[in-house]
């Protein structure tokens, strides 16, 4: 099988061609980082326009780099949720157009399932059941993957995701946002003293596997204000003393943000092993999983609990087309796909888009154990 994957759920326009033996034939990402830096966040209408402008070129490049044409494809996989519907629509419209013209089946993909399953492309030994911690800009999920399409949610965020906290901290510290906030904080944190600011770990009193990052964000904002750090002065122009102060906040924030992940993962592993004693892997994926400090700390937790960590390479942790194509292959193999769209389907049809789409059912035992 050869599958083209298309991803437009948030601010990256991505496409890739993947073969069912796991070979990545091509991978193309067009990022809206410049737009984001200019406007300080994702505006749906602007993101939609940027996707519309990029999509044809991104798909063309993915096919070119793979040395293939549409005729060589077995199917098209496209993210249908969760995400911004205006943005999802651009990818789905493109996927359906190609599928219509070349009579190809379509696989509609859950963005977070794709973040998790791409780990099975890079680690051939990774069988179901396994656990996954999915950490990105909009999600903070701990899941138990029983089987393809069968997931139980052990924990989620009650407010913000960790990536959002990284992005805001970076913005308030005056870091260069032409790249996303996460990598900028990771780099600056290396210069800082992680114990210099005493942030408290979120939700200590809640003995469940849920997350909260809104309170930590507020703590960071207050620390920045009390040190009179001015985000309008870019870090590159900051005085030496000011730079040290910013680095200390970055490092202290990162330490506590990750301690929260460590604590929840430890508990989730214990829960999960009670339900599925055969689990041997914890997958960590999503944009924040490209962070080296996050990986190193979670590796310790996982090993301490007798499991193994699987963390995709950074380019497969942040949004990409490979994870969509690969998840398409997994579903296609099991006979889960839609037939090619009818040749007379109008371009302005109402498509099956799922902007809010939970991944699996909630773990109820977790709720009763809480508090
Ligand atoms: P979602 O997957 O929830 O829909 P998304 O698709 O926008 O969100 P991803 O590309 O999966 O997000 O992840 C982007 C997030 O990852 C951003 O918040 C970004 O700051 C964060 N991130 C990327 N690299 C790093 C890093 N090295 N350290 C910390 N965070 C990072
Ligand atoms: Fe994502």
Image: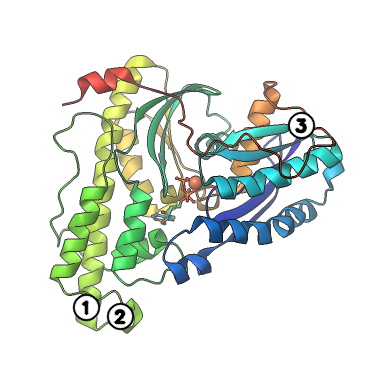
Identify the mark nearer the N-term, 1 or 3. 3
- Residue 133 seen from this side: yes
Looking at marks 2 and 3 on the same chain, the residue that comes earlier in the sequence is marked by 3
The residue that mark 2 highlights is 233
Q: Nearer the viewer, residue 167 or 290?
A: 167
**Residue beneath label 3, please?**
105
8 left or right of 341? Answer: left
Nearer the viewer's eye, disc 1 or disc 3? 3
Cβ–Cβ below 8 Å for labels 1 and 2? yes
Residue 128, percent from left and from top: 51, 22
Separation of marks 2 and 3 at Cα, in angstroms? 52 Å
C-alpha span from label 1 to label 3: 56 Å
> Is disc 3 placed on a helix, strand or loop?
loop
The residue that disc 1 covers is 242
Closest to the camera, between mark 1 and mark 2, is: 2
Screen quadrant of the C terminus: top left
Q: Closer to the camera, 219 or 117? A: 219
Q: Secondary structure at mark 2?
A: loop
Q: Residues within 10 Å of mark 3 (few under 14, many from 20)?
A: many
Q: Residues within 10 Å of mark 2 (few under 14, many from 20)?
A: few
Confirm if mark 1 falls within 8 A of ligand 1.
no
On the image, the x and y values in percent for residue 369 come to 21, 21
């Amino acid at each position: 099988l050869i599958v083209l994957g298309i991803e437009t759920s948030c601010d990256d326009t991505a496409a890739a061609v993947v073969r069912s033996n796991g070979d990545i034939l091509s991978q193309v990402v067009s990022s809206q980082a410049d737009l984001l830096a200019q406007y300080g966040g994702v505006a749906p209408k602007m993101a939609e326009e940027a996707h519309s402008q990029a999509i044809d070129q991104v798909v063309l490049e993915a096919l070119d780099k793979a040395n293939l044409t549409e005729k060589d494809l077995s199917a098209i996989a496209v993210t249908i949720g969760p995400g911004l519907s205006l943005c999802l629509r651009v990818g789905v419209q493109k996927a359906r157009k190609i599928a219509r013209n070349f009579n190809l089946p379509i696989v509609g993909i859950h963005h977070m399932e794709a973040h998790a399953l791409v780990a099975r492309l890079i680690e051939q030994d990774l069988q179901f059941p396994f656990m996954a911690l999915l950490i990105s800009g909009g999600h903070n999920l701990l899941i138990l993957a029983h089987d393809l399409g069968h997931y139980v949610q052990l924990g989620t965020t009650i407010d913000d995701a960790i990536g959002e906290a990284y992005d805001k901290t970076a913005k308030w510290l005056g870091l260069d946002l032409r790249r996303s906030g996460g990598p900028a904080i990771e780099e600056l944190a290396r210069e800082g003293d992680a114990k210099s600011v005493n942030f408290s770990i979120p939700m200590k009193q809640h003995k469940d596997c849920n997350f909260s990052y809104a309170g930590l964000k507020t703590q960071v904002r207050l620390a920045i204000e009390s040190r009179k750090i001015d985000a309008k002065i870019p870090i590159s122009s900051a005085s030496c003393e000011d730079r040290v102060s910013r680095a200390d906040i970055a490092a202290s924030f990162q330490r506590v943000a990750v301690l929260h992940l460590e604590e929840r993962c430890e508990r989730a592993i214990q829960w999960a092993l009670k339900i599925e004693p055969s689990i041997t892997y914890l997958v960590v994926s999503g944009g924040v999983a490209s962070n080296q400090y996050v990986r190193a700390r979670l590796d310790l937790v996982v090993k301490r609990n007798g499991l193994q960590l699987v963390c995709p390479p950074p380019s497969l942790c942040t949004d990409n087309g490979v994870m969509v194509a690969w998840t398409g292959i997994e579903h296609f193999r099991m006979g889960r796909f839609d037939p090619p769209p009818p040749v007379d389907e109008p371009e302005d049809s109402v498509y099956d888009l799922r902007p809010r789409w939970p991944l699996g059912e909630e773990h109820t035992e977790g709720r009763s154990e809480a508090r």
